[in-house]
Image (cartoon, grey):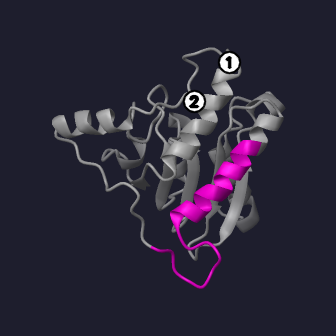
Amino acid sequence: MAEGEGFEPSMRFRIRAFQARALGQTMRPLRKMRMLEGTHEIVDAEAAMEIALSEAELARDHGDVPVGAVLLSPTGDIAAQDRNRREERGDATAHAELLVISQRSRDLGDWRLEGHTLVVTLEPCAMCAMAAVWARIERIVYGAADLKAGAAWSLFNIPQDERLNHHVELTSGVLEQQCGAMLTEFFSTRR
Ligand SMILES: [Zn+2]
């Protein structure tokens, strides 16, 4: 994959956050997420992110950029988990986030995923961020920022665009280093 196609992570998140503050924008606190209700195995965002990372690892096996996603139900159960399959399927829409949203909707027979949390290793693109809005997902939790294609703060902030009639809570920077390192390593071996 050539540079500039998106997906590439950046470790310059702090600078970006600083610039955002300078512009008078506010962002929700990093690494903060309420504990999910219930006596389930998955009790916090980091635990879910670990699973998303294991999915991302698998994406490399079929030559895909390592991005993984987990969808948590309102009670904190894993409702779906998948990974980027763009190369595997030859499908530009086969992003991890879309796959877990579709899977869950098929399982429930309902496009409304209120109360669900989308956990993904990389900041969602515009397509996936908008899908989360359409599905009325409650929260997106992501690891590494994507300054080149991110649409959950970096280039656009679709989940929190006040012009849209549904807003999605955002939490960023969860296991950011691990998420970013996996991508950096992937791209370094391709150059
Ligand atoms: Zn996407």
The residue at which mark 2 appears reads as 7
Q: Position of residue 106 (x, y in %)?
A: 74, 59
* Disc 2 residue crowd, few under 14, some 14–19, many 20+, Cα 10 Å: many
Side of 108 relative to 113 (left or right): right
Q: Earlier in the sequence, mark 2 or mark 1?
A: 1
What span is in magenta?
35-57
Residue 129 is one of the magenta-drawn residues: no
Disc 2 + disc 1, Cβ < 8 Å: yes
Side of 25 relative to 63 (left or right): left
Quarter containing the N terminus: top right
* Disc 1 residue crowd, few under 14, some 14–19, many 20+, Cα 10 Å: few
Identify which amino acid the numbered label 2 is placed on: Phe
The residue at which mark 1 appears reads as 1
Identify which amino acid the numbered label 1 is placed on: Met
| Label 2: which secondary element | loop
Q: Residue at 41% of width from left, 53% of height from top?
A: 170
Work out how far the residue at label 2 is from the one at label 1, CA to CA, in angstroms.
Answer: 10 Å
